[in-house]
Amino acid sequence: MNEPWGKDGPALAARAVTKTYANGVRAVRGVDLEVPPGEIRAVVGENGAGKSTLMKLFYGLEQPSSGTILIGGRPRTLRGPASAIALGVGMVHQNLMLVPSFTVAQNVVLGVEPGRRGLVDPKAAVETTARLAAEAGLSVDPRARVDEVSVGMRQRAEILKALHRQAKVLILDEPTAVLTPQETEDLFAAVRRLRDGGMTVLFISHKLREVREISDQVSVMRAGSLVGTVATADATERSLASMMVGRDLSLDVDRSPARTAQVTLRVRNLGYEAPVGQSLHGLDFDVAAGEIVGVAGIEGNGQSELAEILAGLRRPTEGTVHVGGTDTAGLDVAGHRRAGIGYVPEDRLHNGAALDESIADNLVVDRHDRPPLARRGILHPNAVRAHAERLIEEYAIRTPDPSVPVRALSGGNMQKVIVARELSAGPRLLIASQVTRGVDVGAMRFMYEQLIAARDAGAAVLLFSADLTELLALSDWLLVLREGRLVGRFDDTTGLTEKRVGLYMLGVEEHDRAHLTTGLGLTGTGTGEASTA
Amino acid sequence: MSSVLDVVLSSAFLAAVLRVATPYLLAAFGGLVAERAGVSNIALEGQMLSAACTGALVAGYSGSVAAGAVCGVAVATLLGVLLAALRLELGADAIIAGIGINLLASGATAYAVYTLLDDKGGTSGLKSGTLPTVTLPGIESIPVVGDVLSGQNLITWLAFLVAPFVAWLFYRTRFGFHLRAVGEMPDAAASVGIPVRRVQYAGLALSGALAGLAGVFLSMGYVSFFVRDMTAGRGFIALAAVFLGGLRPWGVFLAALGFGAAEALAVQLGTLDVPPQLVSTIPYAMTLVALAVYAWRRKRRGTTTEVAASL
């Protein structure tokens, strides 16, 4: 068990590994995988393809039903993360595994604390963290509380955690999902440095462009099996995508130019004093019917607050919001719905659906109180069922029956239920937050098509996304939010690069107010002027 | 009014505060340890009651107060482990399981006393004695301080040492470090190889033991016999102190001391010309007021835990 690493052979390997869960789901089927030391290996696949399960097997969070896991060239039995850690395997989880109230240093040493006889030496913890950070070129503030630092620094802290445990293999599970382009570049530089120092890196992702940039080889998984491993140099995004889904599929968005009609959403001098989180200051913008407007920004710069204000979940403290002529700023959520607003929340597990209720019930929550679903306060179950069956068909929701609870669906299908509900209501304004977060390539493609179809049907769409590629592909024009203010406006996304938008997101560049408010019909010295000064 | 002030400023009153605050302090720290381990110990009340009863009975029958105290604390510790098992092994809701333990303790102690002593009220018929008092040499000669501190029960001294002990445990030891990580972010703790359940078992056992000390004090220090349901809601007030103290050792210390002072005041005012029914509501009224203040402050500040969860 605690035998040292072999002299040669793969750093990490799976031999005919199968994992069948207690409920009969076979998540991994006969996978053979070998990763030589000092390589960056990408593992790609759709959601549910078995990537995460395979990683859990390597990290000891799950045990294989059959087959062998090899670490350092020898077969191993991993009883838990502790045994994987002892063998030099470190993992950076997608949802970071840090204790929010602990400092960066405390998180880094957690589990292997310096100090004698059951005590923790806080000074040594800080020193160790600072030393590791300097060696690896990962800048962190060891004394800062984790819940007060950026997502990027949290992720660097996670990597330092693995380094503190003398990891020889580092598993990165979707590490770039929450990073800005610049932070991603820094991460990649650090990962390359680690590789050059002999580290073996497993990089899990479904962003194929990043996979092409960072990895030496790519292993593709589909439906629990390993489809193949190719040298990154020989792969294209297109070839990888078709390996992942088993058919030719492109994520290029086919989008005709917007045919904008009149303004649907008019936001003027919108301000919001947030008790917790990001406040908003003096926002002015219009969204016209028949166009998709993207809102870019590093997470936590006011996107969630803006989306929730427009959906009626929060009240603005100043300014006005008009949707199709209705002043919605003072209305409750139902009032917002009546004004024709559809909302796909960023956190679908908490705000998007009632997870323990059926698909059918979730599909009617915004319209259960009126015909044809209900008459005189009595709900008609047959009408509800028929309604659900129609939407399940139309939105290709994969489920055996409308009575299945939403919790049982995969991420992509859960999101389809929410999108089906919101779009089938025929919204005048659609607020869509992180629509494709955690959904697989197939479902992602579907969401893109649906958003464009809604636009073409005349809806004004305000799209919030942490994925810049997605924003640039879908949006007719783009706004950038930073620290609760609008700092960038790009009236045409053609030829606009992620890097350029990233500069505005980070605050390196900023548009002046005249540019931001062009065409909004504001007078030169409005009240908004003062609040952005 | 001046008579009230006379009472409050007397050294006898301060001594009473220390005595009365003892069970609140111990139970509150028991609650704090459990809460920080991520499992609410609402069974403090039942653990105290069981310890009080066991302590008095064992001491009475064996003639040894030490044996009584040890057995009382042991029973409460086992109830802590029982709560942990119900929560961690069987997945029971900690609140429901805690209520169950409280009801069980109330019924079982009354039944045990009735069966053994044929007395429905308590163990006053049994001579069980009290735990020794401690007087530091020379302390009696110091004015006021001497009057307040001398002759306090051994457990009262322990209760006041519990605050620095728990603070040291939480922030200086590996166990405390792991306990806080487990309570705040069990997945993170598990992912670095900390045995989450084992830490929670240990936390709840310690929680039960502290509640047990509080219970033993009630029947073997405060008075020298067990009375049916003698905890009178102290476990719940202690739980209020845990939250009022912001889940921090010194905050909990002050909150528990405050509740002790309120009860001591109620006892002292009972000797004056104030309706006793009204006076006896003071600790409970203060709990409500304190919790309202706590909730209001929390609302104004916004909850940092929510922010963390949403990130």
Image (spheres, grey):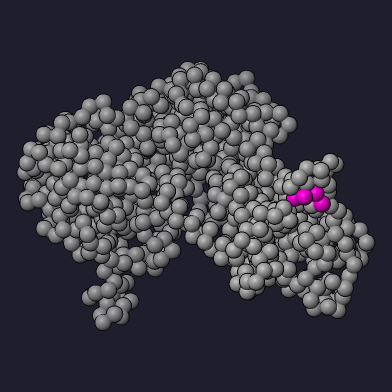
Image quadrant in which the C terminus of chain A is located:
top left
Q: Residue at x 63, y 49 (%)?
A: B253
Percent x, y of residue B301: 42, 48
Query: What range is drawn magenta here?
Result: B147-151
Specify whether residue A270 is in view: yes
Residue in front for this viewpoint, B9 or A156: B9
Percent x, y of residue B70: 83, 55
Percent x, y of residue A239: 31, 34
Residue A358 appears left or right of A495 = right
Residue in front for this viewpoint, B235 or A111: B235
Q: Residue at x 36, y 56 (%)?
A: A351
Look at the picture and state if B179 lies above or below A404: above
Residue in front for this viewpoint, B243 or A521: B243
Residue A87 appears left or right of B56 = left
Look at the picture and state if A517 lies above or below B231: above
Residue B16 appears left or right of B244 = right
Specify whether residue A161 is in view: no
When asked about the image quadrant of residue A285, the answer is top left
Q: Residue at x 54, y 34 (%)?
A: A107
Percent x, y of residue A234: 34, 25
Q: Residue furthest front?
A: B2
